[in-house]
Amino acid sequence: MEHRYETGHTPNTEQLSGSYLVEYILEERRKELVFRGLKWGDVKRLNKVGADINLERYKEDNTAERLPSGSPKFNLPIPQGIINQTNMEQN
């Protein structure tokens, strides 16, 4: 964060605590990691602790595809080669 602000203009975060601090950190993370493809991991992690983030994508005909926070579609399938080697159960 210190590299994105001019010297002496970095926001003071010492008074922030609890949920305000977490919210501020997440906002800064979104700014720093934009367009890097890291949102998926953050959404999964935050939903585990109760953030209840639902994803939506709109198509050209203005219909929405929704992925609710508790959906099993948040899990990516384990590659079949790994399942064959380890006898692991598919998500």
Image (spheres, grey):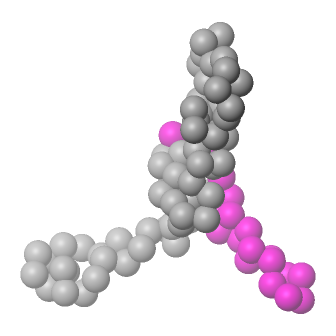
Residue 27 image point, x, y percent: 66, 40
In the picture, measured across the screen, residue 82 lies left or right of residue 60, that is left
Assign the N terminus to one quadrant of the image: top right
Residue 75 image point, x, y percent: 44, 68
Q: Using the image as rendered, state which of residue 48 and residue 35 is in the foreground.
A: 35
- Vertical relation: 68 (above or below) 81: above
Q: Residue at x 67, y 21 (%)?
A: 8
| Residues drawn in magenta | 49-68
- Vertical relation: 85 (above or below) 88: below
Q: Residue at x 28, y 83 (%)?
A: 79
Q: Which residue is drawn at 57% across and 38% down?
A: 3
Q: Using the image as rendered, state which of residue 23 and residue 69 is in the foreground.
A: 23
- Vertical relation: 23 (above or below) 35: above
Q: Residue at x 54, y 45 (%)?
A: 46
In the rendered image, residue 67 lying in the magenta stretch gets the answer: yes
- Note whether residue 32 is visible: yes
